[in-house]
Amino acid sequence: MATIAKTRYAYFLLILANMIWGGNFVIGRIGADYFPPFTFSLLRWLVAFLILTPFMVKRLKADWHILWKYKWILLLLTVTGIAGYNTIIYFSLHFTTSINAAVVNSITPLFIAIFSIFVLKERLTLVQVIGISLSITGIIFILSKGSLGALQAFSFNIGDLFVLIAVVCWSLYSVVVKKYATVLPAQTTLYITSFMGAVMLLPFSMFELNRPDVHVVFTPMSIFILFYVGILASIIAFLSWNTGVPRVGAAKSGIFLNLLPVFATIFATVFTNESLLWYQIIGGMIVIFGVLLSSTAPKTVQQRALR
């Protein structure tokens, strides 16, 4: 009975993590009205770093020798996952809808499988190849808005293309995290990369804010947005995910990633003026089916990282 209760609790944590990450796409879309992308990402990680500091100081001292030994790996994680992925996503949400961004983002597990061939020396199975092909088809369908003419003219939304770039960054980040998961302590790695990400984003934010047409708007809503992305999306979701994965197993946990676009779509249609369009439904179903099919393969690389 106790084992069943622990398993159900782990499932709850995995669902909670993806619910928060799904909300992050909608919040990011709303936040685009208050913050330019570099500054938004900077403030997100600054909030996370400040919140984590009281709990991480002693642990950081204990783990410092390990973190310093792998400093270049931490730099790679910061560039791809902390500074790169989130900034590009926030930038893309100035041009595309949160529904499109979330659905395109759902191809991430498949890119992770591809990167795992080169980084982790794993092989793709036939099922994974089929899953990847289906998901790419779904992504193309969404980007072309179901129009063969748009596909031939390459008239895609530039925001959607930026999401694909962000997916590549996040996939590389996730595979590197998996490769070094046994040597890098998860919590202090999050803490130190949050700090490094904030430092890295600072000059870009300053340059961004020097433009006369760019400004930050502080209101009760924008402050709520910062706390959401800084605490819920950057800390709570990460801790929930990394607590649930060991209890359920990586293969089963990976399937829960497909809930992210579902939650994002629900939140976008309920809390914003976005409409769910037919090509998003069809393309999203193709993507989700492809990811689910690929997730059933025994050697699929799953995510164990911050979203």
Image: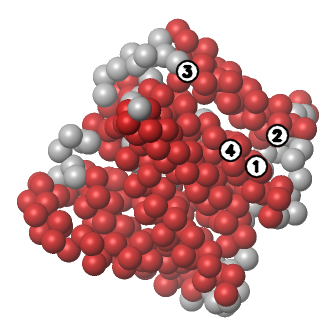
Measure how far apart labels 4 and 1 are at the Cα level: 6 Å
* Residue name at image x 40 percent, y 55 percent: 239
Q: Residue 32 or 154: which is nearer the viewer? A: 32
Q: Nearer the viewer, mark 1 or mark 2?
A: 1
Depicted 285 relative to depicted 172: above or below: above
Q: Which of the image's four quarters has the N terminus?
A: top left
The reply to whether dot 2 and dot 3 touch (C-beta < 8 Å) is: no
Mark 1 falls on what kind of element?
helix
Q: CA distance from mark 2 to mark 3?
A: 21 Å
Which label sits in the foreground, 3 or 1?
1
Which residue is denoted by mark 3 in the rendering? Answer: 294
Q: Quadrant of residue 188?
A: bottom left
Question: How many C-alpha atoms fall within 10 Å of the one at disc 4: few (<14), some, or many (≥20)?
Answer: many
Q: Amino acid at mark 2?
A: Gln
Q: Amino acid at mark 3?
A: Ser
Q: Earlier in the sequence, mark 1 or mark 2?
A: 1
Which of disc 1 and disc 3 is earlier in sequence? 1
Question: Marks 4 and 2: which is nearer the front?
Answer: 4
**Identity of the residue drawn at 65% across and 81% down:** 222
Numbered mark located on residue 280 in the image: 2
Residue of label 1 = 265
User: Which amino acid type corresponds to the residue marked 4 in the rendered image?
Assistant: Pro
Q: Which mark is residue 261?
A: 4
Q: Nearer the viewer, residue 35 or 255?
A: 255
Q: Is residue 268 left or right of residue 146?
A: left
